[in-house]
Image (cartoon, coloured by chain):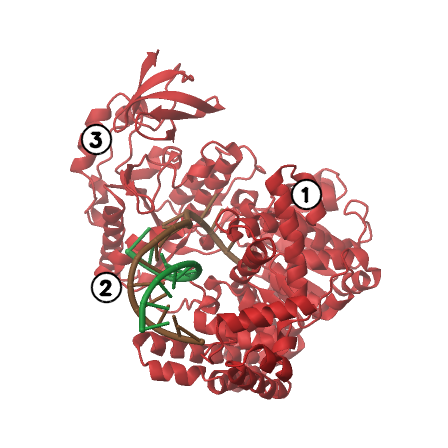
Chain colours: A red, B brown, C green
Amino acid sequence: MIFLDGLNEAQRKAVNHHRGPLLVVAGAGSGKTRALTHRIAHLIGHHGIDPTNILAVTFTNKAAREMKERLEVLLAQNVSLAQFGQPFKTLPIIEQRQLRNKIYQEITKELWIGTFHALFARLLRFDIDKLKDPEGLSWTRQFSIYDEKDSQNLIKEIVVQELQLDPKRYEPKKIRWAISNAKNQGWMPEQLESETGDKRGKLISEIYRLYRRSLAANNALDFDDLLLFPVHLLLQNEQIRGYWHNRFKHVLVDEYQDTNRTQYELIRLIVTDGSSAKGFKDWSDRSIFVVGDADQSIYSFRAADFTILMDFQSDFGDKEPDNLTSTMVKLEENYRSTSNILEAANALITNNSERIDKILKATREEGELIHLTRCDDEIAEAEAVVHRLRMLQAANHNSGWKDMTILYRTNAQSRSIEESLVRWGIPYVVVGGLRFYDRREIKDILAYLKVLINPSDTVSLLRILNVPKRGIGKTTIQRLSDAANQLGITLWDVVSDEEAVKSLSGRSSKGLIQFCELISHLKKKLHYVPPHELIQNVIEQSGYASELISEATDESEERRRNLQELINAAIQHQEENDETTLEDFLASAALASDADDKDTASDRVTLMTLHSSKGLEFPIVCIVGMEQGLFPSYRSLDNPSSLEEERRLCYVGITRAKERLFLFHASERRLWGGMREPAIPSLFLSELPETLLKGEIPRTGGTSLRKENHLSRLTRVDREEPRASKSSSLPSNAVRKLNAGPSPGRQWNVGDRVMHSSFGEGEITHTFGSGQKISIAVKFSGMGPKILDPRLAPIQPLGNT
DNA sequence: AGGAAGCCGTCACTG
DNA sequence: ACGGCTTCCT
């Protein structure tokens, strides 16, 4: 059976799993994607499961695409061997193509593989009109999906227009964030109100209530609704729930450690048909198969909860010890990284307390040591990274730019690095900046399409009413909106009524009537013209194209190219999903992430956040900004569980590396345009075994402070070639031992005075944590309190006053 | 009605 | 230092 070929024992056990619950604890680089893909192929090819009975949840759209791709290859290989008795690759090209197409038509096309958001947006397209809302709100199947910006605009309108509050005091962004949190907990406005007692909380609940009404009036959903609405629908409608329960008999979830309660509910409702997970026993024709690694849970900020993973067995299993039930498989062999890299990652993560015990075993050679570089500031750091990459590229012809990645904690850090890359003419790509679908011209054209499908979508209508210019100004729009509000009808109802338009706006009525003609003309084409052609029509007939042409600037040229790219995207979407609709295309545009459409083929260095790097691997990985307050983030310094999440993030970063790992930190950094701030090496650096490190290892503690600063200035940026590694400037272990680690017997108490090498004298105002891992807050004169790790900070006790 | 100029906040991670 | 937004001017 080819689906089991080349797998290790644990992987084989996972792939062979047929019915019932199974948790696959899969460490970094242990072949979990392989296990998932092979299992789906095995279900279909071996157990004869109908592809329509499978639901597979991936973490990104890109992962979904790749999984389908791999599945096609696997299944084609299987058919090829069975029918023709030879490997797929040896078939004539034409037969290869025919076979691939057959597999697509009969199998992969039928599979529901995608992110939670994409899959459940699709489910809602079937049944959203049957949703019973407690307030009697309703939506139709033509609903729009609002991105974060659209949602914030809606909230801003509520704050300013309806409540007449100051949007600076009540920032739409923060309110949206609070509402999003509530939705992720599964709370409606009433529940949010009862959870938060204070005045502001009450107001936010009220805005939440108005925001929901506003979304309904626009026939629109935000990202959170895409998960929350299906939960309500499945809870309240037995018939619909029964349908999806019977349809999806085999459910697979990747990155299970990063699911939140709402997502868990969706899975539970489908798998158990509404009964409790513990109470569900009939596994005769179904399975739930989840894959994850608690050590890689890095999304608590959007309510991900890895205890869902930790509880999986007691939840879906029967609480027997595992060797009796076989509801867990551990993949512990790492095929990705050298053993040095792996050992460092293992050492780091043992500092966390909340874990499933798991040791990642190396299968590869020792490899190079991990290289540490200390730099003066963020500019020197950028130069040092770029220098390092240039050396690697020059020294090793096997390393192209595409083998290298630079990872950082925050997006803002990319700027200085980009400047250096540009200066040295190194090709690079930034993942996670401005999404393609967030560009102004793209959003404009998509807004036209949304209005065509969903005339209630006032946010989109307002966006395009005067784009391109039609002489419809602010006052006209205000008048029309007021009329719509007073009459309780949509803006479109007013705009499309010629009489109303004429009476309300003498001067701009011409432009408005022209606009309505355009829309009704395009609407006629909606159902018999393919999406890409309709997009083309919108671009041309709206006058958007001619406006860009007459502008004739570099910028307008760029916009035209982007619009062409949009047409291409629609064509591609059609090719990949036949029988697709414009609604489908718009949904995929709304749910696309920046990482999804980056081409990985071209030879460029990749820049991204540590979060975005999840699931990827690179031969050469550089992590920059390894400093207290930056990574780990300052928000985590006084919160043990956040600090553990930061550590997991670091673990994720380290385990992306296959061959070489380079860590950088600066001794001074300019933070958000303000003044330069001295920076202290990251706690995580001190948690890596020194035997695995080379380069300038930050020595910590108070005693040899002056000497250290002197030394670091002399050896600031390492300009050695990689091959000169044997002569690295590793300080003697004796010295490091003396200075690093907990100072035995040293107590830090509130009220103690300390001397800091850069900040001068200060007083401890708070202590956090206990035992060896403590942080202290120190008030120095002339600045706010500083949170420091006494093991790392260059401080000396002065005794208390 | 529409453009230009200055102003202000912003920097956590994301589908 | 950046871009989006307000405000002012025509």
Report the Cα–Cα distance between label 3 and label 1: 53 Å
Horizontal side, residue A370 vs residue A268: left or right: left
Callouts 2 and 1 in the same chain: yes
Dot 3: within a 10 Å radius of its alpha carbon, few (fewer than 14), some, or many (20 or more) residues? some
Q: Which mark is residue A702?
A: none
Where A16 sits versus A479, above or below? above
Identify the residue under disc 2: A425
Asked if the residues shown at circle 2 and circle 1 are in contact, with their CB atoms under 8 angstroms apart, the answer is no
> The numbered mark 1 sits on a residue in which chain?
A
Label 3 or label 1, whichever lies nearer to me, is: 1
Dot 2: within a 10 Å radius of its alpha carbon, few (fewer than 14), some, or many (20 or more) residues? few
Image coordinates of residue A155 in percent, x first then y, are 57, 56
Dot 1: within a 10 Å radius of its alpha carbon, few (fewer than 14), some, or many (20 or more) residues? many
> The numbered mark 2 sits on a residue in which chain?
A
Identify the residue under disc 1: A193
Horizontal side, residue A137 vs residue A536: left or right: right
Horizontal side, residue A224 vs residue A596: left or right: right
Image coordinates of residue A636 in percent, x first then y, are 47, 37
Helix, strand or loop status at disc 2 = loop
> The numbered mark 3 sits on a residue in which chain?
A
User: Quick one: label 2 or label 1, which is nearer the N terminus?
Assistant: 1
Q: Tell me the kind of residue under disc 3.
A: Asn
Callouts 3 and 1 in the same chain: yes
Q: How many marks?
A: 3
Image coordinates of residue A169 in percent, x first then y, are 50, 46
Q: Tell me the kind of residue under disc 1.
A: Glu
User: Quick one: label 2 or label 3, which is nearer the N terminus?
Assistant: 2
Q: Nearer the viewer, residue A717 or A441?
A: A441
Identify the residue under disc 3: A709
Q: Tell me the kind of residue under disc 2.
A: Gly
Report the Cα–Cα distance between label 2 and label 3: 33 Å
Regarding residue A42, the answer to whether it shows in the image is: no
